[in-house]
Image (cartoon, rainbow, N blue to C red):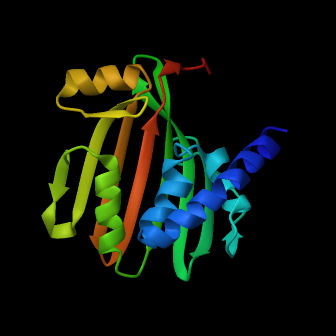
Amino acid sequence: MKMLELSLAVSIAWPAAAQAQTQAPPFYAAFKAICGDTGADPERVKAAIAAAPFPKKIDPPISSNLIFPQAQTDATINWNGHRFSIQSAKTHVPVGGGISTDVLMCSITSSENEDAGLASVRKWVGVQPTSTIAAFRITNFNYRQDGSVRTPLVGDAASNAAVAQGKYWSVSLTALGIYRARLFHFLAPTAQKAK
């Protein structure tokens, strides 16, 4: 039932997303509709992809416990003639002191030049970069999100408070060889279950 509700909600949202894709760079439009509007939640990402009115291939979900427990979905989409790879994952990460957090991640990757799309994602983030690795054309943005307000995270105290409240978000942009935008959401920590 939950998946049906998500699919219905996403199906209603697609006409607006389809209109936006004609007005915005396709890379940005896909990132916003699939990662941004879903909050990087893997179930909502999967529903958004399934309900999308364009060709797509969704790979079977995979699970891994190599480093931390993780469930991941991969898909390839054709957004208005642009081919993008989508990854969505939920990873369970220990943060110390018997506490762990779930990290949601959604990324869109393209092998074509997506400078205009990355510029639009930078504008969408709306905060100054936290770090830049110029040699590899990687830019990271860490911010606290309260409703629609984003505040850059400066210093450990601000970052730790945002993590503790489940309001820590991060965007990582790459533009060297491949073009990738990743959205991360660190959910509020919980006590780890005893083994």
Q: Residue at x 24, y 23 (%)?
A: 158
Direction from residue 2 to residue 80 in the image, left or right? left
Direction from residue 156 to residue 29 in the image, left or right? right
Residue 177: which quarter of the image? bottom left
Q: How many marks?
A: 0
Q: Residue at x 42, y 49 (%)?
A: 183
Q: Residue at x 39, y 60 (%)?
A: 181
Residue 40 vs 32, above or below: the answer is above
Is residue 62 something that shows in the picture? Answer: no
In the rendered image, residue 193, in percent from the top left (x then y), is placed at: 60, 19
- For the residue pair 150 and 69, the one nearer the viewer reads as 150
- For the residue pair 74 and 56, the one nearer the viewer reads as 56
Q: Quadrant of the C terminus?
A: top right
Residue 60 vs 187, above or below: the answer is below
In the rendered image, residue 94, in percent from the top left (x then y), is placed at: 45, 29
Is residue 7 something that shows in the picture? Answer: yes
Residue farthest toward the left in the current orientation of the protein: 134
In the rendered image, residue 117, in percent from the top left (x then y), is placed at: 36, 68
In the rendered image, residue 34, in percent from the top left (x then y), is placed at: 56, 56
Q: Quadrant of the N terminus?
A: top right
Residue 52 vs 98, above or below: the answer is below
Residue 70: which quarter of the image? top right
